[in-house]
Image (tube, rainbow, N blue to C red):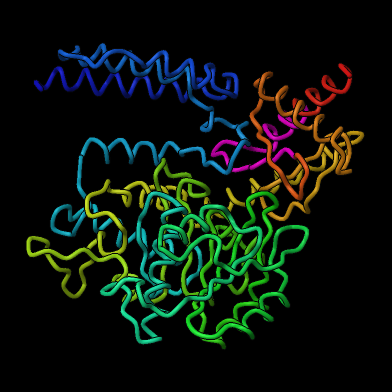
Amino acid sequence: MEAARLEDLLGVAARRGIDFRLRTSDALQRPLQTYGACVADFDEPLPETPQDALELVEELADKGERGLQMATGSRFFGWVIGGSHPIGVAADWLTGAWGQNTGNHQAAPAAAAAETVAARWLLELLDLPRHASVGFVTGATVANFVCLAAARGAVLRRAGWDVEANGLFGAPPINILIGDDAHTTVFSALQFLGLGHDRVVRLATDDQGAIVSPALIAELAKASGPTIVILQAGQINTGAFDPFPDIIPTARRTGAWIHIDGAFGLWARASAQTRALASGAEGADSWATDGHKWLQTPYDSGYAIVSDPDAHRRAMITAASYLPEAEAGERNPSDYVPELSRRARGFAAWALIKGLGRRGIAGMVERHCLVARRMAERLARETAVAILNPVVLNQVVVRFGGADPGELADSITARTIERIQEDGVCFAGGARWRGRQVMRLSVIGTDTDEAEGLRSAEAIIAAYRSVTNAR
């Protein structure tokens, strides 16, 4: 493509992206079109001839924007979705323009170097063992998969079985101990690894979803052979943490591999105000967390962190005669992730950690936790609105129509959520928690501050009053 045409094309994309970001906070905080309408927009017969590139990008922007969530705005609380900080977006645009395949340190030296440094910074920020290895993956789902692959290999190797070479046929069985309220993606990772999502031992949890220590200790006493214990930092509804100081030393003495799913909760360790919630987590063997949540990198970005780099590498490495091996002082990014060919995820991570700094990241975590508490306090003052969790982090569980488990409150809660989404002042979603319909608020947007949180709380109350008055 000729230079002028290339500049025009990328300029159109940049302009449309910037325009969208500038409008986000003032727009309705929900998609303007449903999935079905979006399919109708995009659907057409397979094109036979090329289309003008500038017209195509404009068309994509027009059609795409009508079906987008305002996840980059300041009043989006629907899921634990970071706001894609502008620094990360800019780095990601460069990443796309550079078009690097981050398979090894020779194919893309700068991309490999950015990952090397960003990995070291991550370990410092989260105060995890500095010798640990880090794989830059798509998100916590794959991070859990990678970490549990390393765990599977390590515990079977101790039992005399090489799973990487021989697979699971004939291998000693592995005990999997996991909390009953673990995130669904961890069960998916176990399924992908051939360990099964139903053959696990599900441990009793308390009313906030944290593992009850005696339940785990009792199961550890009964377990024999290779064992993996899966813990959680930040339950997806309540934000609760498993009691690491009680559990991890006991599990360590049995020889079990200890993994922590910390998709967003592990970032509590980045702030002095919240660090105690994840105290003792450094004693685990592996940790999964997201960059596109509290670090605010664009999607897709996650980190698989393993205290035993050899186990990590054995589980993931791809070898071929045409692929360069990493010598001393070198790091091949693909040695720590499932993909050989992938985008250069380290650039955005490096840019955001450098751009925000330790204090900026800690301050963001603290601000979001404060906003969550303030929103909960305001909502709790409304008659028959119940907050079902101590707001220890950034998650708020709300029940409308009272805390009782009856169908009437279920109905009022569901209709309130619908009204909130229709009004579009903010966006919140529903969930089932302990058999009850609830609304879940996840405070994690780049620009979400106390003022926007309270504005949203008032909009939520207005929606609730509208529903109850209509009755």
Decide if residue 319 is on the left or right side of residue 364: left
The answer to if 269 sits in the magenta stretch is no
Quarter of the image where the C terminus is located = top right
**Residue at image x 60%, y 51%?**
365
Decide if residue 377 is on the left or right side of residue 235: right
Give whichever of 277, 7 is nearer the camera: 277
Q: Can you give x and y, in whole percent of width and height, for residue 269 in the image?
A: 57, 63
Provide the residue span drawn in magenta. Answer: 438-458
**Residue at image x 35%, y 15%?**
43
Q: Is residue 459 above or below residue 251?
A: above
Q: Can you give x and y, in whole percent of width and height, for residue 400 in the image?
A: 83, 35
Q: Residue furthest front?
A: 170
Quarter residue 398 falls in = top right
Q: Is residue 396 above or below residue 317?
A: above
**Residue at image x 40%, y 16%?**
63
Quarter of the image where the N terminus is located = top left
Q: Is residue 373 above or below residue 148?
A: above
Give whichever of 225, 206 is nearer the camera: 225
